[in-house]
């Protein structure tokens, strides 16, 4: 029989796809108009599409094809197992050899006393299992009220209702009634975006101590577990400061709560060890696994559980499971994948060859005018795009605009590089060579150059306004380093004025130097002020609401505060008080 790879023209395949295939995390109408890219084959680190383009896969599929594409050994393992035992369940007090062998191998590879495995078909299912398991564990210990699970904003733990609730993705929570009750979120350790004026070490400690604060507020007798990825993958490859994880470990130990390490992305060599927990010295009670377990060749996941939890769960009946838990074909393929990683010393290749070289090349991207930060752990890295490196500024455009433009340029240059907001991320196959890393970096430079030119041509190389950045910075406490809850603006107009100009006085050097000379009369609500940059006037300090309403305008002429914002942002333009209400000229 002849293998069919691309038996129809691309346009026809795209049309059929648009008519019948609902894609995950995709605006269907927009994709239908554009047409999906049709991938027809793959080998090593390269994909080939229906038009014959050879694409370097900088994302290893979806963070998962660790041993690369086209390994016939895994196809052979699947075929052998299908002929021998294509399926049987592990309910009804039965088991089979592939599930036994895989569970035994995973307990050998996992650190510490993580010696027990509950199999699933995905990371989402595994994290749903972890919710049930953590709550059942405490209930069987006589503490059923100990049920709250703490996670982090911008974390990704899956897309089912349970695992999606554990994650902290706002766009996911906006759909489908998430999060479910009993899940609490604290802030992520993203120093670049949220660290303000704190040093990374201070910020890492402050963000870790939010866990302790949350436990104290919720009640130690109410909190069952804390779940986190060693390195936040889908959140943008967020690498916590060095002080973060030791403090998290201390808090979990001190308050007797379960620590769940989501290793779906970080596991099976991605960080230069078998598991990210080993790289970052984390001692979890439960590890979530999937993706690299089979290098994506078969859908399989699971939870690796420590002796303490497994013994308690095993004392009763755990009323939980899936049709394909420990599927024999998926288990056989995963075993063969682990054999290849081990016998071909792929993790040694990552640790000694690929990761150090990729780190050197990846960090060199900070020389590009669009790149402010480059972070990388093992074979997962990210760069932060910014219009202003010195201030770590965000773009004035809608978040993700710059990232989307650069991602499109990357795809156009045959490199799969993903964007998360205005961060570009990579996670290539672990078997990538030095020469292939050079190609990846060369294509990344081209994508950045073209993205920069596009942003410049479209007038998008602008920083967010001073006022927007100041309010964001003010929401980070200099004492605790924690992001406060969204500010409720005072109802009283005068109180709003005092709040904003108090913030302005603290943060604007120009105002600090002028206010003693009487020039601050230009900011008095009882007078009008005029911008020396364009001559536009407005009425003092009437409120500028966060909803975008423009009461802080010239009330007669409705002149928007573009020039005002420029002055506040740069602190280089001067103001002069005027009497009466001159005509607006802007």
Image: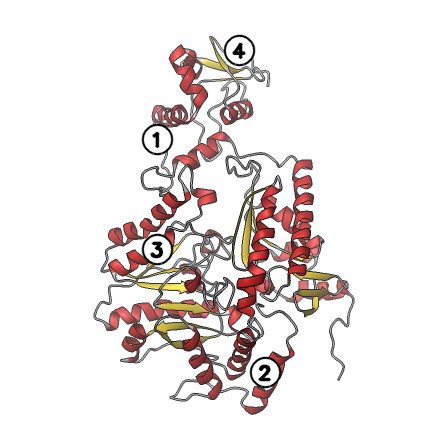
Query: Along the line of sight, which residue is nearer the eye, 484 or 297?
Result: 297
- Label 4 to label 3, Cα distance in Å? 61 Å
Query: Label 4: how many residues lie within 10 Å, few (<14), some (14-19) or many (20+)?
Result: some
Does the image show residue 305?
yes
Residue positioned 66% across, 68% down in the render: 44
- Label 4 to label 2, Cα distance in Å? 81 Å
Number of the front mark, 2 or 1: 2
Q: Secondary structure at mark 2?
A: helix
Query: Residue 229's spot in the image, x, y percent?
Result: 43, 60
Query: Along the line of sight, which residue is nearer the eye, 555 or 467?
Result: 467
Q: Which residue is mark 1?
A: 491
Task: Indicate which disc residue 246 carries.
Answer: 3
Check the image and report above or below for 310 versus 52: below
Q: Give the image quarter of residue 114.
A: bottom left
Question: Looking at the image, is mark 3 or mark 1 earlier in the sequence?
Answer: 3
Q: Which residue is mark 2?
A: 78
Question: Looking at the image, is mark 4 or mark 3 earlier in the sequence?
Answer: 3
Q: Is residue 19 left or right of residue 307?
A: right
Number of the front mark, 4 or 2: 2
């Amino acid at each position: 029989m002849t293998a069919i790879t691309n038996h129809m023209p691309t346009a026809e395949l795209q049309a059929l796809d648009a008519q019948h295939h609902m894609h995950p995390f995709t605006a269907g109408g927009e994709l239908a108009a554009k047409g999906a890219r049709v991938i027809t084959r793959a080998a090593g680190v390269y994909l080939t599409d229906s038009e014959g383009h050879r694409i370097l896969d900088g994302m290893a599929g979806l963070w998962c094809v660790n041993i690369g594409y086209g390994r016939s050994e895994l196809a052979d393992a699947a075929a052998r197992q299908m002929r021998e035992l294509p399926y049987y369940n592990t309910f009804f007090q039965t088991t089979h050899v592939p599930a036994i062998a895989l569970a035994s191998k995973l307990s050998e590879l996992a650190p510490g006393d993580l010696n027990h495995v509950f199999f699933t078909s995905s990371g989402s299912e595994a994290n749903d299992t972890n919710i049930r398991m953590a709550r059942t564990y405490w209930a069987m210990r006589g503490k059923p009220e100990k049920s709250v699970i703490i996670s982090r904003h911008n974390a990704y733990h899956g897309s089912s209702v349970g695992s999606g609730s554990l994650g902290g993705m706002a766009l996911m929570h906006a759909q489908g009634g998430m999060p479910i009750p009993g899940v609490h979120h604290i802030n992520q350790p993203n120093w670049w975006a949220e660290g303000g004026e704190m040093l990374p070490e201070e910020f890492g400690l402050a963000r870790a101590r939010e866990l302790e604060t949350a436990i104290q507020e919720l009640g130690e007798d109410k909190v069952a577990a804390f779940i986190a990825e060693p390195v936040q993958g889908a959140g943008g490859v967020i690498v916590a400061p060095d002080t973060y994880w030791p403090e998290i470990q201390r808090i979990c130990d001190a308050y007797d709560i379960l620590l769940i390490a989501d290793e779906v992305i970080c596991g099976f060599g991605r960080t230069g060890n078998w598991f990210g927990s080993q790289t970052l010295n984390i001692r979890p009670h439960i590890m979530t696994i999937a993706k690299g377990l089979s290098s994506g060749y078969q859908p399989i996941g699971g939870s690796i559980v420590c002796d303490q939890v497994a013994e308690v769960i095993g004392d009763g009946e755990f009323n939980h499971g899936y049709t394909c838990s420990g599927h024999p074909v998926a288990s056989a393929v995963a075993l063969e994948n682990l054999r290849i990683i081990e016998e071909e010393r792929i993790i040694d290749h990552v640790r000694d060859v690929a990761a150090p070289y990729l780190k050197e090349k990846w960090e060199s991207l900070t020389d590009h005018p669009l790149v402010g930060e480059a972070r990388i752990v093992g074979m997962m890295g990210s760069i932060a795009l910014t219009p202003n490196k010195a201030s770590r500024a965000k773009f004035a455009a809608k978040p993700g605009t710059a990232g989307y433009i650069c991602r499109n340029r990357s795809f156009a240059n045959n490199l799969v590089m993903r964007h998360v907001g205005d961060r570009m991320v990579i996670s290539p196959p672990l078997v990538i060579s030095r020469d292939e890393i050079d190609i990846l970096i060369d294509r990344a430079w081209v994508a950045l150059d073209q993205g920069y030119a596009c942003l410049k041509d479209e007038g998008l190389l602008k920083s967010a306004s001073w006022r927007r950045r100041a309010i964001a910075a003010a929401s980070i406490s200099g004492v605790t380093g924690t992001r406060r809850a969204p500010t409720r603006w005072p109802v009283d107009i005068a109180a709003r004025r005092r709040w904003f100009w108090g913030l302005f006085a603290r943060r604007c050097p120009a105002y600090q130097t002028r206010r003693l000379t009487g020039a601050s009369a230009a900011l008095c609500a009882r007078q009008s002020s005029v911008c020396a940059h364009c001559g536009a006037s407005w009425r003092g300090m009437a409120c500028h609401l966060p909803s975008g309403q423009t009461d802080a305008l010239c009330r007669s002429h409705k002149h928007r505060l573009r020039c005002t914002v420029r002055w506040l942002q740069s602190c280089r333009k001067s103001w002069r008080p005027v009497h009466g209400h001159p005509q607006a000229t802007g």
